[in-house]
Amino acid sequence: MSRTIFENIVIQKFEQATSLDFCQYTPIRFFEILHIEKGSGTIIINNHRVKYNDNELFILIPNDQYNLEIETRTTVSAIKFLNNFFSTFSLNENEVQRKDWFRRIETILHNSDRTSHLNIQFKTDKSSLNLLFTVLCNEYNDEKLKNEVVLKSTLHTILHIISRNVNFISSKKSNSKIQDIINYINYNIHNPEKLTKKELANQFHFSENYISQYFKSKMNVGLKKYILNYKLKLAETRLKHTDLTITEIAQELGFTDSSHLDKTFITYKGITAKTYKKSLKIID
């Protein structure tokens, strides 16, 4: 089986573990989903201690270091997207799957609370994730299976379920109208037709004239400015972790062209996107 898309993904499962050794992939891991199927103990993420129990998910990003202090035998699965997975993807049609996964992961990266486990709101999602992780691990690790269609569809579903649940993570603005608006904007950032004042006003039952005023009064930043800042944050993620050109990033995020993105990026980082990208290579 051709497993090109999975060459830089590592999927692991540890049954009834009493300890976990340091993972060789951690230093080259871009993004990781840790699923605690069963067990209890403490997960230490960058020296921050969090208790874990059955059916919990944790999100790890670049440079996160973690280990488990296991109290009761723990069954845990890990999906690790290595650095090279997204670094070489482009916007041609052959990379549609990878592009969609990157967008899902972006949503999780920029909206999840990594000081705790991911709060899965729906019981059906919790049970579905348990089954999906079992299917994914069995398919990936059994040499007689390894069907890429099954692997792709299962991983796609896992990412979709997680990305829709990060929109429900509690915050100081939880259960409020403004949090719902922020969640909606972040989730639909690649769909500009859903982010017009008219569409937002219809979606959240405001008048078109009042939606901007309401948003600014709650967030201390204008609606258009918030959307722009979030796009620039996503542009920064792409500059750091992919080989997309400035033109491709501009196209993806709805800027007129690379020059438009460059000029706008200056207001965000004080330098152009092109200069920022070059500085990353120097640091490396």
Image (cartoon, grey):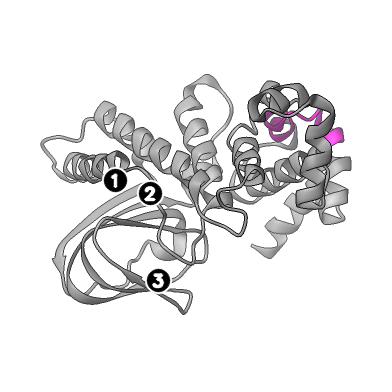
Quarter holding residue 38 = bottom left
Q: Which residue is mark 2?
A: 120
96 in the magenta segment: no
Q: Residues within 10 Å of mark 2 (few under 14, many from 20)?
A: many
Q: Earlier in the sequence, mark 3 or mark 2?
A: 3
User: Which residue is depicted at the point 64% across and 44% down?
Assistant: 238
Amino acid type, label 1: Lys
User: Which residue is depicted at the point 49% across and 25% down?
Assistant: 96
Can residue 1 be seen by looking at this rendering? no
Q: Earlier in the sequence, mark 3 or mark 1?
A: 3
Say whether marks 2 and 1 touch (CB < 8 Å).
Answer: yes
Amino acid type, label 3: Tyr
User: Which residue is depicted at the point 29% across and 44% down?
Assistant: 123
> What is the magenta range?
248-261
Q: Which residue is mark 3?
A: 66
Rendered location of residue 87, percent (x, y): 55, 44
Specify the quadrant that holds the C terminus: bottom right
